[in-house]
Image (cartoon, rainbow, N blue to C red):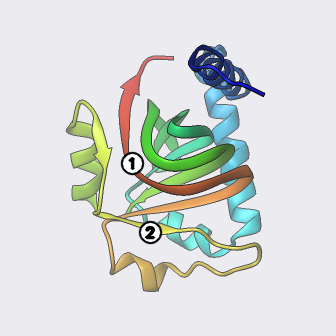
Amino acid sequence: MNMTRRKLTLSLGAMGALTACGNGVGSTGSSTIDARVDSTLSQMYYQFPGTVDLGKKASGMLVMPLVTEAGLGLGGAYGRGALRVGGVTVDYYSMVKGTGGLQIGAQQYAHVLFFMTQEALSNFRRSPGWAAGANIEYATPEKGETLAAETTTSMSPVIAVIFGQSGLRLGATLEGTKYTRIIP
């Protein structure tokens, strides 16, 4: 089979459009996002009970219920979610991620950023577009694994818990993630 550059470009475009549809990009309204955030938090607390204490100690949480990621050489991801402070939604955000390197595949997952200090939360809320960087401690718990707030809060002012992965994406990439406030 001879794949031309045009076919490859069209295939990647179709894959991106398909993943965007599955991510609810076209869905509107804050009530939809809030319902997905509630469901995501319930799932996380049920699967990883240690995150309940983490949530109680956090100054705020950014919940991204569904992030869709795909790549073939170049890739990207998109998701929408809500910032909760004291259990109440205060803002809505989109997340865009760009990747480049040796990669192939697609996956979906949920993630929650726990802002463990008031300063980290304030910095996030003040910025027009916040880029995730080396100041985040990533925790990817396996099913049934305990995530203890005591051991992770001293390491980083922002902790990202990633869970509910489905799909397969392989590779080694350089990547950048940006969170931007939106009006749903």
Amino acid at pointer 2: Lys
At numbered mark 1, what does the secondary structure look like: helix, strand or loop?
strand
Label whose residue precedes the other's in the sequence (2 or 1): 2
The label on residue 142 is none
Q: Is residue 28 above or below residue 65?
A: above
Quadrant of the image occupied by residue 97: top left
Camera-nearest label, 2 or 1: 1
Q: Is residue 111 left or right of residue 136?
A: right
The label on residue 57 is 2
Residue 100 % position (x, y)? 42, 43
Amino acid at pointer 1: Glu
Q: CA distance from mark 2 to mark 1?
A: 29 Å
Q: Is residue 126 above or below residue 111?
A: above
Residue 178 % position (x, y)? 36, 38
Residue 179 % position (x, y)? 38, 37
Front-lying residue, 179 or 168: 168
- Within-10-Å neighbours for mark 1: few <14, some 14–19, many 20+: some
At numbered mark 2, what does the secondary structure look like: helix, strand or loop?
helix
Quadrant of the image occupied by residue 148: bottom right
Front-lying residue, 25 or 77: 77
Residue at which label 1 appears:
175
In the orientation shown, which residue stands out farthest toward the bottom? 151
